[in-house]
Image (tube, helix red, strand yellow):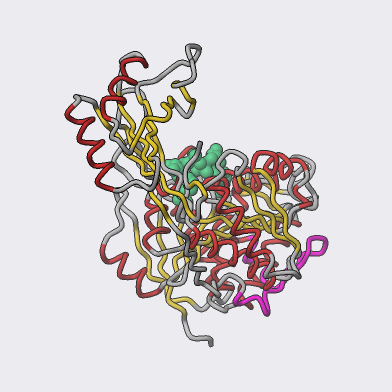
Amino acid sequence: MKKKHPITVLQGDGIGPEIMDAVLHLLQTAGASLEIEKNFIEKGEIKKATWDSIRRTKVILKSPITTPQGGGFKSLNVTLRTTLGLFANIRPCVSYHPFIKTKHPNMDVVIVRENEEDLYAGIEYRQSGDVCTALKLISRPASERIIRYAFEYARRVERKKVTCFTKDNILKLSDGLFHKVFSEIAKEYPDIESEHWIVDIGMAKLAATPEVFDVIVLPNLYGDILSDIAGQIAGSIGLVGTANVGLKGALFEAIHGSAPDIAGKGLANPSGLLLASVLMLVHIHQTEAATRIHNAWLKTIEDGIHTKDIYCEGMSQKKVGTQDFTDAVASRLGKHPVQLKTVDYAGHQNAIIPSHIGSTLISSKKELVGVDITLQSYDPIEKIVLHCKAAETPSLKLEKIFNRGTVVWPEEASEIQCVDQYRCRFFGNKVVKGETIASLMHRFATGGCDVVKLDNLYTFDGNRGFSH
Ligand code: NAD
């Protein structure tokens, strides 16, 4: 018997306990060799003993957790991903035509989502009455890591193409960096086709013709949205399992949430968590059990034994609840699908483990050339200009004032509906010193202005590191 592999089970809430019990029972029946450390998440908190277990086993199987409502709570899912450095999120979205209703019979897409940055970093501010802001954070090291991961994954599982989605026609610096890194890394993988789409048309294309995509790599928030769309158009989000992996651990879960509307009714489809557990078995090199469970699951789907969410009159044979569905899979262990493609994970054991981490050190000449000072003000623009002019220093002059990204001075902008935050851009006639900016700030403060934010403006090798 294979040595038991320790795993931490995180029992969530809502439908979490029902689907987890079903999946653990199936794993046991299928002969997976696991030493299960079962932990519970209570009142939105991960206890020290649970963290100890996670750090010991480094492999987590998790059922969904309800995100508490209201301010002050950070999502536990996000906390787990960021604390454990689980930078890559892999979501295979496959259609099971003709057994599960879908408009896309040939869909077989793997979404590789960056998992730690972007708007998901959750850095938000309210600094004036009218405006809330959220920071979209994209870094070169994280972009390199996830994009290289996508190409490595594609190579290991013999996929042909990696597509990148960004919105770099608008977000030229942040998404622009992700796209630039994609183009650089793609050159290192000449055996794999690469392409880029603007995310909106890319998503529309995926919704219409998913069969033209293979592996898709994208920043965190787009990945979150796209993978739910992809799961749903494949058949149901209840069918998608996902792996979150990093250098120090891996977490496997379904992509759906805790479904409070059906919790405790025995109706939930356990397939997402079940397929996540298959990814987990591959990850811990128990590929035989993974292959056995996945093929038994495919046969169950093929036999028309379906939970309510995927049941379709005329196509399905029997509508079952969570328990009966799991029993149906268990009774088919050792069987293979006839029409759907049989899976075989032999040789794929290292498919989702990250390798080749490391990032390129970029050295460039960085120069401070100006500053954006954001003021809260209800004054007319003429008065704001007077305040700014009074704060100018000999080497730092007012160039423009923006409201919600649109220039409202020096251009006439009477049609614009202004809010209470004005971003006032000051440029130096040469490289600016930090003390000059401090002196500008001092002049604003003594002038009675409400400065809510300051952003330095830099160039890198002469290229602007700020938007226009
Ligand atoms: P949800 O995915 O829980 O439910 C959306 C719809 O899909 C519901 O109608 C639900 O009944 C159905 N559904 C979901 N999973 C199903 C399954 N396995 N079988 C059958 N039907 C299923 O999304 P939501 O309602 O937006 O979120 C509920 C809670 O879950 C929220 O607090 C959310 O933050 C949380 N959530 C957690 C995770 C996670 O733990 N990874 C992921 C997403 C959402």
Measured along the vertical axis of the image, is residue 232 above or below residue 400? below
Residue 258 visible in the displayed image: no
* Left or right: 193 in relation to 447: right
In the foreground, 210 or 319:
210
- Look at the picture and state if 271 lies above or below 468: below
Residue 342 placement, left or right of 260 = right
Which residue extends farthest left? Answer: 446
Horizontal and vertical percent position of residue 220: 52, 50
User: Does residue 394 lie above or below 377 as drawn?
Assistant: below
**Compared with residue 239, is residue 7 higher up or lower down, i.e. above or below?**
below
User: What residue is drawn where x is 75% and y is 56%?
Assistant: 303
The quarter of the displayed image where residue 192 is located: bottom right
Q: How far from the left and from the top, in percent, is residue 70?
A: 32, 35
Q: Nearer the viewer, residue 290 or 29?
A: 290
**Relative horizontal placement of residue 183, taking residue 66 as reference (left or right):** right
Q: What residue is rendered at 69% in x and 71% in y?
A: 155
**Residue 287 visible in image:** yes
Q: Residue furthest bottom?
A: 1
Magenta span: helix, strand or loop, mainly?
A: loop
Residue at the image point whose x is 50% and y is 46% from the top: 464
Q: Nearer the viewer, residue 241 or 374?
A: 374
Residue 228 in picture, x, y percent from top left: 59, 45
Q: Residue at x 32, y 39 (%)?
A: 395
* Magenta part of the chain: 328-350
Give the farthest residue toward the right.
Answer: 339
Please say whether residue 334 is one of the residues in the magenta stretch: yes
In the rendered image, residue 215 lying in the magenta stretch gets the answer: no
Q: Nearer the viewer, residue 296 or 243?
A: 243
Q: How far across and how far down the image is residue 461, in percent?
A: 50, 56
